[in-house]
Amino acid sequence: AQRVTQPEKLLSVFKGAPVELKCNYSYSGSPELFWYVQYSRQRLQLLLRHISRESIKGFTADLNKGETSFHLKKPFAQEEDSAMYYCALRHTSGSRLTFGEGTQLTVNP
Amino acid sequence: NAGVTQTPKFQVLKTGQSMTLQCAQDMNHEYMSWYRQDPGMGLRLIHYSVGAGITDQGEVPNGYNVSRSTTEDFPLRLLSAAPSQTSVYFCASSYDNSEAFFGQGTRLTVV
């Protein structure tokens, strides 16, 4: 069965520090993975998808099929990065998404 | 474009009451879905639809019904509200293999 795990519910860093939000998955097939972000009192929005391999707001994420991971990284965190981050996996059959538990990132001044 | 619109934004229900959460999208997306968001549990899929007239159950469908009579609308019905259904509900839509767009959410409290 497909599953997405985000081991850290809460993550707190200081402004300017590197940040890494962990995501591991299990899926029998070729996964498509995403990071969604939810800023305070706003709707979820797409941050990254692995197939596009781009950097958004300084964030990057690399799919590691050997370790079944899709960690989100940013070298220098900013206060405006404070948000809830969700890792998600899309099923190959249709558009269903399986989400991880979420990581609440707080960037302190 | 309005995108995905959910109504109401907030709702308080008494146990046993029924209600419908509305979701509408104006992007002509075929795929629509409902999630509930609970602390520490992420978003869990309740029901989804791959097109008008087609619906299917997700991970946590019990206590909820859906229908999809048009491409634009995908209402979620709570048949007899229970305190365990206190949650934030999100509707989402997408084309197949594209980014999912989410509504602003409905915060439901069942007392």
Image: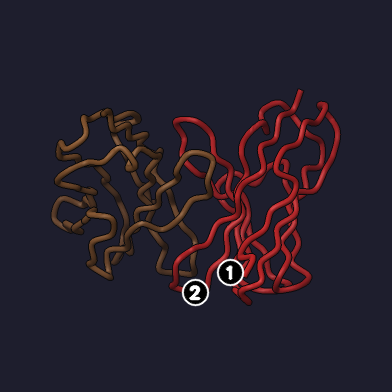
Using residue A25 as the reference point, say whether residue A65 is left or right of it: left
- Residue appearing at x 32%, y 42% in the figure: A81
Q: For the residues marked 2 and 1, what is the alpha-carbon distance in whole angstroms? A: 7 Å
Question: Which chain is displayed in red in the rendered image?
Answer: B
Q: Which mark is residue B31?
A: 1
Using residue B23 as the reference point, say whether residue A9 is left or right of it: left
Which residue is the extreme one toward the right?
B17
Q: Earlier in the sequence, mark 2 or mark 1?
A: 1
Q: Is label 1 in a helix, a strand or a loop?
A: strand
Residue closest to the eye, A79 or B71 = A79
Query: Badge 1: few (under 14), some or many (20 or more) residues near its Cα, within 10 Å?
Result: many
Query: Badge 2: few (under 14), some or many (20 or more) residues near its Cα, within 10 Å?
Result: some
Q: Where is residue B55 in the image (x, y as percent from the top left)?
A: 67, 64
Q: Are marks 2 and 1 in contact (CB under 8 Å)?
A: yes
| Quarter assignment of residue A63 | bottom left
Residue closest to the eye, B15 or B2 = B2
Q: Is label 2 in a helix, a strand or a loop?
A: loop
Quadrant where the C terminus of chain A sits is top left
Q: Which residue bears the numbered disc 2? A: B96
| Quarter assignment of residue B4 | bottom right
Q: Where B24 falls versus A36 (above or below)?
A: below
Q: Position of residue A87 (x, y in %)?
A: 35, 49
